[in-house]
Amino acid sequence: MFTSIINTEQETTEQVPRSSPPWVWIGFLFAGLFFVLEIAFVIMDVDPAVMTLILTLVVLGGWIYFLVCVHRIHKILNELARNRYPYTPGEAAGRHFIPFYNFVWVFKWPGELSRYINGKGRVRMLSGGVLGTLLLLSLFVRFVDGAFGMAFLFGVTMYISAKVNQHVKAVKGITADQLPPLPDPRIFSRPVESAAPVAEIVKEPSAG
C-alpha cells in the first residue's frame, strides 16, 4: 500500500523538463523577410511567377518552423507530465498535415495545453478556444498578407511558449521541503493502540 501511495504521488507531481523552450523569435525573421522581399519585388518589377515561388518558399519555411516550435512545446509538456501528457510531440506537430482535420486540431491541442497549465494552478493562460481562434485567424490573415499572417501566428505561439516557460519556472521553484510529507508506513502495518485510562487522583481533605 505504501508503494502505491508513492506511485500515485509521482503520477500527480511534475518533474523539471530537460528540454529548453523554442526560440519563437526566429519565426518573426521569416515574417520580416517576407515583408522585405514583397516590397523589393514590387519595386524591381520581378516576374510574378518568380516572386510567387520565392514568397511561397518563405511561407513554407515559416510554417515548418512553427511546427518545430509546437513539437518542442509538447516535448516540454511530456517531460513535465512524466510522459503522461495526452499528445506526443510527433502527434502535436504531425496532425497539422491532415487535410480538414487540421482546422480542428488547431483548437484541440491548445485546448488540452490550456487545461493542463490552468489545472495545475501555477500559471493562468487564455482558454483553448480563444487560442485556437487566434491560430485559425492567423492562417486566414496569411492569405491576405503573408508577413502579417506569420507575425500573427508566431505572436500567438510566443504567448503559449511564454506561459509554458513560466509554468516550468514555477515547478523549478518548488523544493522538497515544500512538498507534503509522506505518511508513516507503520500506520498501515499495525493497529493504533488505545491509550490507557489515566487514574483519577483524589485529594484527601485537610485536617481542620
Image (cartoon, helix red, strand yellow):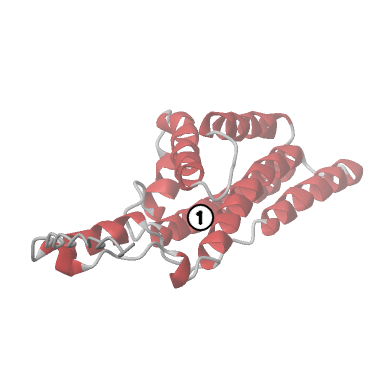
Crowdedness near tag 1: few (<14), some (14–19) or many (≥20) residues, C-alpha within 10 Å: many
| Quarter of the view holding residue 84 | bottom left
Residue at the spot of label 1: 73
In the image, residue 192 lies at what x, y percent?
A: 13, 61
Q: Position of residue 126 (x, y in %)?
A: 60, 36
Q: Where the N terminus falls, by quadrant?
A: bottom left
Q: Going by the image, does 172 lie left or right of 38?
A: left
Q: Nearer the viewer, residue 84 or 182?
A: 182
Report if residue 18 is visible in the image: no
What count of labels does the image hold? 1
- Residue plotted at (8% across, 65% down): 190
Label 1 sits on a secondary structure element that is helix
| Residue lying at the far left of the rendered structure | 190
Q: Which residue is at 49% across, 68% downward? A: 19
Q: In this view of the protein, which residue sits in the foreground, 112 or 9? A: 9
Q: Is residue 86 left or right of residue 62?
A: left
Give the residue at the far front of this rendering: 208
**Residue ranking furthest to the right:** 43
Look at label 1 and name its amino acid: Ile
For this view, does 93 lie left or right of residue 56? left
Whole-percent x, y for residue 104 in the image: 44, 29
- 178 or 102: nearer the eye? 178
Q: Quadrant of residue 186?
A: bottom left
- Quarter of the figure that contains the C terminus: bottom left
Res 132 seen here: yes
Residue 29 on image: x %, y %: 74, 56
The answer to which image quadrant residue 142 occupies is top right
Q: 35 or 21: nearer the eye?
A: 21
Which residue: 70% across, 41% down? 52
Above or below: residue 137 compared with residue 66: above
